Image (spheres, rainbow, N blue to C red):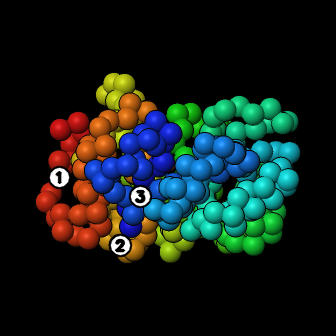
């Protein structure tokens, strides 16, 4: 299964074309909860055609003050109403003292944070009655680290029983910027807990910095990293193509979906370029 992040930018054409044919669509519940009128009707039409996956933006499991339980209950209702196949979120924080920061910021890799975040996750899972599926983020500075990111994630998974959304492009971006081995990082994840995979493009600023923009095509080294990852995790995990900005023609999006499908089905076994930017 290969899906696409549903964007209002292409919604009109999407419902009336067979050019773009993902296996499922992903939406952020926050953007659709409580809507009425035109967009409610449109969401219904999308759901008639495609299975719905949900990927939240504002749960903020890393917030020191805890999670907003009323918000979690609203999400739960939305998941039930839409019969969403899965619900994932970010292992980041985006809220402090009720101020929304409108960004997904890295949680400091500390023991204190492990305890606080685990407590938040357990509360959310208690309301949702299902494991949370949390995504590894991209980051550009490491705040007050007492442990590695891999140890941080492993500790949280073992304390809470949560599951993982492995964003392969985020791993690539962090490994490039902080000069570590992306395959080694993925190998150190609890791979049996990976239930969902994200793939995206990023922007190269210079030879030392790339930024996770979701605004470019996926590059070959990231496809290669996915192929390598799926040898470890198995091929049945659903993969999402994220494209949030600089959205190309629908044909181009379908080309990327097709490439992902070929890789997943091991039909594409060509050795893609491994060097950056070729
Ligand atoms: Fe992602």
- Residue picked out by circle 1: 272
Quadrant hosting residue 80: bottom right
Quadrant hosting residue 100: top right
* Percent coordinates x, y for residue 202 in the rendering: 38, 37
Task: Indicate the secondary structure of the residue bearing disc 3.
Answer: strand
Question: Looking at the image, which residue sits at the far top?
Answer: 206
- Residue picked out by circle 3: 3
- Residue picked out by circle 2: 235
Sequence-first tag of 3 and 1: 3
Front residue of 129/110: it is 129
Q: How would you rate the neighbour count of disc 1 (Cα within 10 Å): few for under 14, some for 14-19, many for 20 or more?
A: some
Horizontally, residue 35 falls left or right of residue 231, namely right
Question: Can you see residue 43?
Answer: yes
Q: Is mark 1 within 8 Å of ligand 1?
A: no
| Badge nearest the viewer, 3 or 2 | 3
Q: Are marks 3 and 2 in contact (CB under 8 Å)?
A: no
Task: Tell me: residue 109, above or below residue 130.
Answer: above
Q: Are marks 3 and 1 in contact (CB under 8 Å)?
A: no
Q: How would you rate the neighbour count of disc 3 (Cα within 10 Å): few for under 14, some for 14-19, many for 20 or more?
A: many
Question: Can you see residue 107?
Answer: no
Q: CA distance from mark 3 to mark 1?
A: 22 Å
| Badge nearest the viewer, 3 or 1 | 3
Q: CA distance from mark 1 to mark 2?
A: 19 Å
């Amino acid at each position: 299964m290969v899906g696409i992040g549903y964007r209002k930018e292409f919604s009109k054409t999407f419902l009336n074309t067979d050019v773009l044919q993902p296996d499922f669509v992903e939406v952020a519940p926050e953007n659709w909860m409580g809507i009425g009128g035109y967009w409610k009707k449109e969401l219904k039409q999308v759901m008639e055609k495609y299975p719905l996956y949900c990927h939240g933006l504002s749960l903020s499991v890393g917030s020191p003050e805890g999670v907003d339980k009323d918000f979690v209950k609203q999400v739960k209702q939305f998941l039930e109403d839409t019969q969403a196949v899965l619900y994932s979120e970010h292992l980041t924080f985006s809220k402090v003292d009720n101020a929304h920061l409108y960004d997904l910021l890295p949680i400091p890799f500390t023991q204190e944070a492990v305890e606080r975040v685990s407590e938040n996750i357990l509360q959310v899972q208690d309301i949702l009655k299902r494991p949370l599926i949390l995504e590894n983020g991209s980051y550009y500075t490491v705040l007050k680290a007492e442990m590695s990111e891999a140890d941080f994630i492993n500790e949280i998974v073992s304390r809470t029983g949560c599951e993982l959304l492995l964003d392969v492009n985020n791993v690539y971006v962090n490994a490039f910027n902080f000069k570590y081995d992306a395959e080694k990082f993925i190998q150190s994840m609890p791979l049996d807990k990976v239930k969902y995979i994200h793939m995206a493009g990023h922007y190269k600023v210079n030879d030392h910095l790339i930024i996770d923009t979701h605004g470019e095509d996926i590059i070959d080294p990231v496809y290669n990293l996915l192929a390598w990852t799926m040898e470890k995790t198995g091929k049945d995990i659903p993969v999402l193509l994220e494209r949030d900005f600089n959205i190309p023609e629908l044909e181009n999006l379908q080309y990327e979906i097709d490439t992902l499908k070929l890789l997943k089905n091991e039909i594409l076994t060509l050795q893609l370029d491994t060097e950056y930017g070729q």
